[in-house]
Image (cartoon, helix red, strand yellow):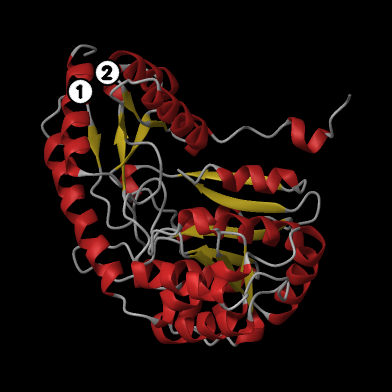
């Protein structure tokens, strides 16, 4: 059987593969310290699960509107107006099967074969694969520590061609944890408006920020940039709802109508009772979000304190998300070999930077408990000292 060409060039998710391998090794009785998955280790807050249970009891188990339950679309629009200063209405919202699905729907809806999509590196590894799946062209713009792993307006402007359709912005970022400032976003917005392209702002980590850093949505910076902005978000990270698979797009009406039609012919509606849990997440107490954020902040500091004392390793202090992106270039080991050897020799699972566009880095997730963090870092330190 000959597979379609569009699928043969797609790389499997390294993140999911390593996470699955680490879990399999744990099931075999090995003492794995996993820093691989971007998944909070907290249970979904009780008031959210209770709302889903109540929805089940009320018979919310049937087909729903392909674009999402009206009450949830309204709650998301209210949230975007209240928290982000974005003047969306319920009609501008599409509820999707997770944040990843929202981005894939957007690519299918917006990108034609040959259209270029600008992606700053390091990037979340699924971005370029999604672009390639719709026969678009990922245009990777490399960044480094000299710009705090952020794309500059000059670099963005230089990357734009007549074929450019979309710019992908991720703040807070996976894998680097960087958060763009209001001034930095304003400078990027000027380029986007002047060159008349679209931007999708992936804000899935918006609630996980530290040290009083301000999270700004680029679409809130003026009417012109708002018209060119699409927001992707979801409930997985802030509310520890990774398995619920509820995300959303917020966009100009024409984009949402087209993406809703697509969803109607692909997945149809998101799990109905899960959407009622999402409503409770937005409309209920936000204390759970702050509790988890404070725990992540404590874990981040432990990781940074330990890593700063390790010769051969360096990392920027992340302002958001729950990752540190560690420079391993001094070890003279590429990221794939580094992570494989670390897992085999020290039973520590990390993610190589190569699929994120930075082969001299690894990603460490601190979305796990402090005991695992301390033990895993002990092993990581031992591994590095043996190799430099």
Q: Which residue sits at x=30%, y=35%?
A: 326
- Residue 63 lies left or right of residue 362; in this view the side is right
Q: Residue 66: which quarter of the image?
A: bottom right
State the image coordinates of residue 38 (x, y, percent, origin top left). Answer: 40, 46
The one of 298 and 314 positioned closer to us in this rendering: 298
Q: Quadrant of the N terminus?
A: top right
Farthest residue toward the right?
1
Q: Is residue 133 left or right of residue 322?
A: right
Q: Earlier in the sequence, mark 1 or mark 2?
A: 2
Q: Position of residue 32 (x, y in %)?
A: 31, 26
Query: Considering the image in quadrants, where does the C terminus appear?
Result: top left
* SS at mark 1 in the image: helix
Residue that carries the numbered disc 1 in the rendered image: 379
Percent from the top left, x then y, of residue 245? 55, 58
Residue nearest the viewer, comparing 185 with 378: 378
Number of other residues with Cα within 10 Å of mark 2, as a class: few under 14, some 14 to 19, many 20 or more:
some
Q: Residues within 10 Å of mark 1 (few under 14, many from 20)?
A: some
> Relative to 77, does residue 350 appear above or below in the rendering?
above
Residue that protrudes farthest toward the front in the picture = 57
Q: Is residue 30 visible?
A: yes
The residue where tag 2 is placed is 346
Residue 155 badge? none
Q: Is residue 210 visible?
A: no
Residue located 66% across and 47% down the image: 130
State yes or no: discs 1 and 2 in contact (Cβ < 8 Å).
yes
Q: Is residue 78 left or right of residue 376?
A: right
- Identify the residue at horizontal 18%, vertical 43% (top origin): 370
- Picture mark count: 2
Secondary structure of the residue carrying tag 2 is helix
Viewer-proximal residue, 352 or 71? 71
């Amino acid at each position: 059987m000959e597979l379609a060409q569009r699928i043969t060039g797609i790389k499997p998710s390294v993140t999911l593969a390593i996470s699955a391998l680490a879990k399999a090794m744990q099931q075999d009785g090995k003492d794995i310290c996993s820093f691989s998955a971007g998944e909070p280790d907290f249970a979904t807050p009780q008031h959210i699960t209770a709302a889903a249970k109540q929805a089940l009891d009320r018979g919310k188990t049937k087909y729903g509107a392909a674009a999402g339950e009206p009450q949830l679309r309204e709650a998301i629009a209210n949230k975007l107006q209240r928290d982000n200063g974005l003047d969306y209405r319920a009609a501008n919202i599409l509820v999707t099967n997770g944040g990843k699905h929202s981005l894939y729907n957007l690519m299918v809806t917006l990108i034609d074969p040959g259209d270029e999509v600008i992606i700053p590196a390091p990037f979340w590894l699924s971005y370029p694969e999604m672009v390639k799946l719709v026969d678009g062209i990922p245009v990777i713009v490399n960044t480094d520590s000299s710009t705090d792993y952020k794309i500059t307006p000059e670099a963005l402007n230089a990357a734009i061609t007549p074929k450019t359709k979309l710019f992908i912005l991720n703040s807070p970022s996976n894998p680097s944890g960087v958060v763009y400032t209001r001034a930095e976003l304003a400078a990027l917005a000027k380029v986007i408006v002047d060159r008349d392209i679209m931007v999708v702002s992936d804000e899935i980590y918006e609630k996980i920020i530290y040290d009083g850093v301000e999270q700004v949505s680029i679409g809130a910076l003026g009417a012109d940039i708002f018209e060119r902005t699409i927001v992707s978000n979801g409930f997985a990270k802030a509310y520890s709802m990774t398995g619920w698979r509820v995300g959303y797009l917020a966009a100009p009406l024409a984009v949402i109508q087209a993406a809703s039609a697509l969803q109607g012919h692909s997945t149809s509606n998101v799990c109905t009772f899960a959407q009622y849990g999402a409503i409770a997440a937005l409309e209920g107490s936000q204390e759970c979000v702050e509790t988890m954020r404070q725990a992540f902040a404590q874990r981040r500091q432990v990781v940074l304190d330990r890593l700063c004392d390790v010769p051969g390793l360096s990392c920027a202090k992340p302002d958001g998300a729950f990752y540190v992106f560690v420079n391993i270039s001094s070890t003279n080991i590429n990221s794939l070999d580094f992570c494989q050897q670390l897992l085999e020799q020290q039973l520590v699972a990390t993610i190589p930077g190569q699929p994120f566009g930075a082969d001299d880095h690894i990603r460490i997730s601190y979305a796990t408990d402090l005991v695992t963090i301390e033990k895993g870092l002990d092993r990581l330190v031992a591994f590095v000292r043996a190799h430099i």
